[in-house]
Image (cartoon, rainbow, N blue to C red):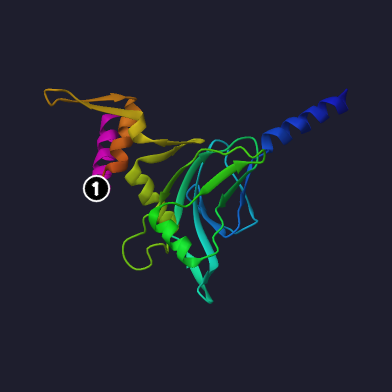
Amino acid sequence: MRNFFVSILVLLFSFQAYAAELGVGSDLKVMVLNGKEVEANSGDLLELAAGDNQIVVRYKSILDNGSKTKFFESKPYVFQFSSVDENLTISIERFRKYQKAENAFKRGEVMWSIKQQSGTALPFRIDILPGNPGFLPYGDLPKAVAAYNKKEGIFFDGQDIKTLEEEVIVAVSDTGDVEISGDALAQLKVWYTKATIEERKTFRKWMIDQE
């Protein structure tokens, strides 16, 4: 009987400890996972968080350019998706010609995919990651991601990634009156992410005075 209960506990622990992994496809490199800098190249596996995940991916490859070859590197792309209880793989269409890759990225016509082991495609959101101001715009990727999330109103809420604009509804009546509805906490988060450092300091001081 004791061995039976031990076996059950081991199975439960194994189930809880299991985390889905993301396989990195050919010519891709994952550089940020959920706000933290990582380095995962083609063939590597990344452990995903349960729930929503955000990654930054870059395409790099040596491609044919006439009679020679030329190195091509894309801008970093931000992906958001929800993990499932199954390993995933992120991949990109295969390019052979430098010009074809360059044109596809310029036009935003690149075919990306995130798939489960079963072959089922997973929906995702994708954006080009804006760089930081000044020299080496992508020298500090976590900083660039933080700025992107702030601008887009994206925040981590436990195991979920939420967009603040989806949590708060702003409506303008025919008379021009503005009405804001939604969760009070979400409204505070909207304001706080948009506020300057000085405004945040003033707000925190005001909160302390209210207690």
Q: Residue at x 36, y 29 (%)?
A: 167
What main secondary structure does the magenta stretch of the protein show? helix
Residue 209 falls within the magenta-colored stretch: yes
- Of residues 69 and 71, the one nearer the viewer is 69
Q: Which residues are magenta?
A: 196-211
Give coordinates of residue 110: x percent, y percent: 47, 52
Residue occupied by mark 1: 198
Give coordinates of residue 136: x percent, y percent: 38, 67
Q: Amino acid at mark 1?
A: Glu
Residue 15 falls within the magenta-colored stretch: no
Q: Quadrant of residue 186?
A: top left
Q: Residue at x 36, y 51 (%)?
A: 147
Q: Residue at x 24, y 47 (%)?
A: 198
State which quarter of the image contains the C terminus.
Answer: top left
Q: Which residue occupies the extreme left position in the image?
A: 175
- Of residues 63 and 149, the one nearer the viewer is 63
State which quarter of the image contains the N terminus.
Answer: top right
- Under circle 1, the secondary element is helix
Give coordinates of residue 104: x percent, y percent: 44, 57
Give coordinates of residue 68: x percent, y percent: 53, 77
- Of residues 184 and 41, the one nearer the viewer is 41
Q: Residue at x 28, y 34 (%)?
A: 207
158 on left or right of 204: right
